[in-house]
Amino acid sequence: MSGTVHPEQARELLTALDAYRQARQAFLAAIATPASNRDPLAEFSEQFVRALLGGSLAESRVQAGYDLTLTDGRRVQVRYLANTGSAWVNEHRVGTLTGVDLYALVIFEAFAVVGVLVLPTGALGPIGTALGKRHPTQDRQLQFTARNWRTIRDDAARFEELGVRIHLPPFLH
């Protein structure tokens, strides 16, 4: 092994990890989530979508498929998309899963929730067409970009006609 040993940097890193650990534990307690090694934004997103839509979370937080069951029996897969600001570097592939009726996408910019989209999985083709998509398998997946987010956000009525539910800040109105 080559290179210089940096014990002070190692101590600083451990101090930073300890601060994160304490903040993470406080965050999980604030959202009433038991101790978890899962991504805290995933935990938050599931809780937040449940608060917006109602229903109940799946018994297993790590099961494949759905994360939430609505009072009418529809199942929802919850995911999130995080970017450091309005200039996105990350995009997201929305897909269909057997037994899942809705796909909820929580959108973060600079750790703030800027919107939540709830898409009917059976309407991905028409939604893709409305967005001007040209990629293959549009009936089963939607390659979601910043441009798509802005198009849906800025023309909500057109996408609501396709069954998309759009939740924007302040969320509780």
Image (spheres, rainbow, N blue to C red):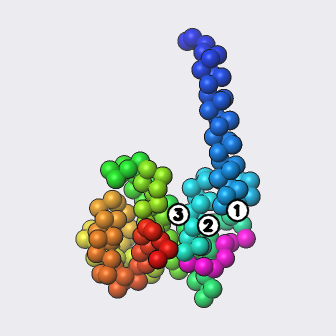
Q: Report the amino acid beneath label 2.
A: Gln
Gap in angstroms between the C-alphas marked 3 and 2: 11 Å
Q: Report the amino acid beneath label 1.
A: Ala
Q: Residue at x 46, y 56 (%)?
A: 112
Image height of 147 relative to 24, above or below: below
On the question of residue 85 being in view, the answer is yes
Q: Which mark is residue 79?
A: 3
Position of 46 compared to 142: left or right? right
Q: Earlier in the sequence, mark 2 or mark 1?
A: 1
Q: Secondary structure at mark 3?
A: strand
Q: Which residues are magenta?
A: 53-59
Q: Earlier in the sequence, mark 3 or mark 1?
A: 1
Q: Quadrant of residue 161?
A: bottom left
Q: Report the amino acid beneath label 3.
A: Arg
Q: Residue at x 33, y 77 (%)?
A: 156
Position of 140 compared to 17: left or right? left
Q: Position of residue 84 (x, y in %)?
A: 41, 48
Q: Position of residue 9 (x, y in %)?
A: 59, 20
Image height of 57 relative to 85, above or below: below
Gap in angstroms between the C-alphas marked 3 and 1: 19 Å
Query: Circle 1 sits on which residue?
Result: 32
Marks 3,2: beta carbons within 8 A: no
Q: Residue at x 42, y 62 (%)?
A: 114
On the question of residue 96 being in view, the answer is no
Badge 2 crowding class, 10 Å Cα cut-off, few under 14, some 14 to 19, many 20 or more, is many
Q: Quadrant of residue 143?
A: bottom left
Query: Circle 2 sits on which residue?
Result: 47
| 58 falls in the magenta region | yes
